[in-house]
Structure formats: structure tokens, C-alpha cells
Image (cartoon, rainbow, N blue to C red):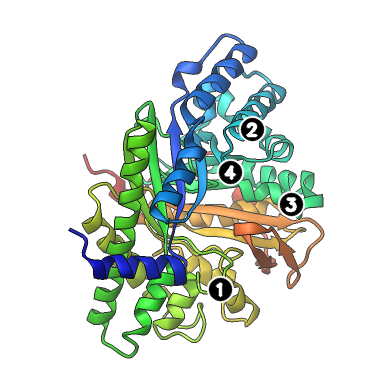
Amino acid sequence: MINFKEVRETNEMIEKENLDVRTITMGISLLDCTDVTVEGLCAKIRAKIIDRAGKLVEVGEEIAQDFQVPIVNKRISITPIALVAGSVCKTIDDYVTVAKTLDEAAKETGVNFLGGFSALVSKSMTPADELLIRSLPRVLSETDIVCASVNVGSTRTGINMDAVRLLGEVIKETARLTAEKDSFGCVKLVVFCNAPDDNPFMAGAFHGVTEGDTILNIGVSGPGVVKTALQSVRGADFETLCETIKKTAFKVTRVGQLVAREASRRLQVPFGIVDLSLAPTPAIGDSVADILCEMGLEYAGAPGTTAALALLNDQVKKGGVMASSYVGGLSGAFIPVSEDQGMIDAVEAGALSLEKLEAMTCVCSVGLDMIAVPGDTTASSLSGLIADEMAIGMVNQKTTAVRIIPVEGKKAGDHVEFGGLLGHAPVMPMNPFSCEDFINRKGRIPAPIHSFKN
């Protein structure tokens, strides 16, 4: 039973410490929407999305009102489109047509984003996969709320370097086509290693082939709650620090579990997982970097940052799995630059570099996220950065991702504004030395020796 003290604590978390349900994401399988024509495929896709998700926003708002718990986003994830549309999409125009259908259907339901314009190419690419990837600059520039992802590596298969090289070019072209919006198209594209099937967070969400026909995944976030809890144990030993984080994560996850069960009941859709990720926002007091500072660092990026982040990530997961039998997705701590005011402050103070961020991704939940770099960064350098991050995920058997924005017309030290939860970012310098000859090699980097576990 929940006692009055816990109710009061939860109310304070919501009112004063930025606790929220960051997203209710409905996963929808489109495998039964295949057709012999693009027009037939689009008609089936539109009908199924509107049928399944038509009440998602309404129910989300009702639950938020009834429980007085903010539910910030309502989203849809779909089966990777390369699997659904590959048999009928023969040109880039065909894929753009499908993307526009997804955009229109998602807007009709009222959701914030739709994720799953995706391809899974960790070992190799089919012609349909490659065509989808080549369509992304137009897809991301000609739609508003469609998000894309490409899984280019895994611990079991290695890294598909042909896809990595192609994506460097795709990101550059996407930046160019959306230059008038500060290259915003790149914000909607994530490159993964070891992508999970049940991630509710954008832009990387897709409905994996291991999932059921329709499912609800919940993403909960509360960096401000954790920071406030740590203020009461300043100077305490590491055991006390860990216990405080773990207990706080437990309470936050219980809120997500409550909302998930109620949404599942009202929508009559099976509950999938709760993703307990400390996902920051630009709001003051809602920062993962501020948690690291509360743990004793002057700035995120100072010596000790990677150790502090590893501790935080681990204790968040431990608290979450005690609160729900179905914790999944990416659960842990996110370190996006533009979405975290503390990270922005650290970059501007000179405490946090791209290289230090890369080291931190070895122990956080995702990877290099929402990082603006100069617009003249070469495609091969972008591919090299992606390859580095994929290698971290492959060798460490964890999910890693890259969401990088080479902002047209901007140079290191400039600022770019994305707005809303996406925030603003200082443009970070890239290493100026070339990796082009390495990136231009064909084939894939093989899986590490510890991948052979049969």
C-alpha cells in the first residue's frame, strides 16, 4: 500500500522537481500492411495508425488530469519501414510518399512524433535498406514529425562500415536541405549500435519485430528529483549516495508503472515496458549534469565525471528494476548537450569536450546525443565519429547512438536554437584531422571475440 508520506513525496516531485512521464509511446506493427502497390500500402498504413492510435492523445490527457501527473509527449513507433515497404518502394520518391503518409496519419492522431522510418543493417544492406537510407535527406526535410533511425552495428554482427560511410553523406545532405531551420532535419535521425526493440524515446524509437501487434511503452524522467534527493546527503559516503539514488529511482518508476497500467486499461492495449531514463530538458533544475555536480564535480567533464556517471546510471537501473517487472528500453541516464542546461554550461566553460563526451558514453544509456558541430565538417569525419561510437557499443555489449547536427553556416563557438524540449546548443569543435582513407574501406568491422557465446 502507498502511505500518505509517499503521496506527499510524489506530489512534491511533480510540483517542485520536474518529475514527469516524458512519453506514452504506442508501438504499432505494420507487417500486415504490406501490399503490391505504394498506394495500397499507404492506405493500409494510414488506416491502421488512425485506428490504433486515434485515442492515444485523448487518453493520455485524461490520465494526466485524473492523476495530476504531467505526461509531456504522446508518440507512435512503428515497424522499421524498410521491412514493410521494401517490396514496393523502388525509388526515393516512393519512400518519400510513404513518409508523407506517416506524417499525415500521425498528425491526425495528434501525437508529437512518429518513429520508425528505419532500417536494420548491422551486417549488410538489402537494396531496399540502402534506398531507404538514401531517401532520408528528403524524408526528414519534407516531413515534420517523422523520425528515422538506422541500426548499423551489434555485438553479434560487428559494424556495417558501408552503412556508416553512407550515413555520413546522408547527414551532410540532410543538414543542407534543412539549412534554413538550423539543419533541424538531423535532429530527427539517430544511428544505433545494438538498438533495442522497445525504446519509447525519440528520435530512435521503432516497433521491433519481436513485439506484439500493438503495445504501450512508457518513458519516465526525473533528473530534478534525483538532484534534490542528493542535496540531503552532501558529503556522505558512496554507499549512502548509491542508496539515495536507488530509492529515488524506485519512486519515480512506480509513477511510470501506475500510468502505464492505467493507459493500458483505458486503451485496451498491452503494457510493454517502463523506460526509466533521466532524460533532461532545458528547464532549470532538470539536468543530468547538475546531478553530477551535486555528487561533487565542479562541472560535468571534470576529472571523475565518467565514474560519477557510471555510478548514477547503475543505481538508476537497480532502483527501476525493483519497482517494475518490465523495465526496458534504454533506462539510465541520457547526456544530450542541447537538451541539458548543465551540459551547455559545461561546454561553454571549457570543461566538456567532444572527446570527454565520447568517454562518458561508455557508461551512460545512449551515446553522443544532440551535439551541434560546424557546418563544414566533412561527411567522412561524421562517419568516423559514428564508427567510434558504434565500436563502444559493440565491444561493451550496450546500446550506443549518435545524433549529430552539422549546422550549415555555423562554426565552433556559435550557438544554435532548436526550441522546445530540444533546447539550444553551442557548436562544438570537431577534430580537424582526416579519417577519409579509413572510412572509404569497404565491408564491415567484424564482431568482437566475446560475441561468440553459443
Q: Earlier in the sequence, mark 1 or mark 3?
A: 3
On the question of residue 444 being in view, the answer is no
**Most foreground residue, 451 or 273:** 273
Counting residues from the start of the chain, the first of labels 3 and 4 encountered is 4
Residue at 58% x, 53% y is 403
Q: Secondary structure at mark 4?
A: loop
Left or right: where does residue 384 sit relative to residue 326? right
Query: How many residues crowd around disc 2 within 10 Å: few (fewer than 14), some, or many (20 or more)?
Result: many
The N terminus - image quarter: bottom left
Q: Secondary structure at mark 2?
A: helix
Image marks 2 and 3: residues in contact by CB distance under 8 Å:
no
In this rendering, is residue 346 above or below 190? Answer: below
Disc 1 is placed on an element classified as loop
The residue where tag 3 is placed is 183
Residue drawn at point x = 50 percent, y = 69 percent: 286
Task: Kindly indicate whether the residue at mark 2 contacts the one at mark 1 (C-beta within 8 angstroms).
Answer: no
Crowdedness near tag 1: few (<14), some (14–19) or many (≥20) residues, C-alpha within 10 Å: some
> In the image, residue 438 lies at what x, y percent?
60, 52
Circle nearer the N terminus (1, 2): 2
Name the kind of residue labelled 1 in the image: Ile
From the image, tell me which residue sits under label 4: 112
Residue 144 x %, y %: 68, 40
Quadrant for the C terminus in the image: top left
Nearer the observer, disc 3 or disc 4?
4
Residue underneath mark 1? 284
Name the one closer to the observer, 74 or 212.
74
Q: Residue at x 22, y 48 (%)?
A: 325
Q: CA distance from mark 4 to mark 2?
A: 10 Å
How far apart marks 1 and 2 lie (CA) works out to: 32 Å
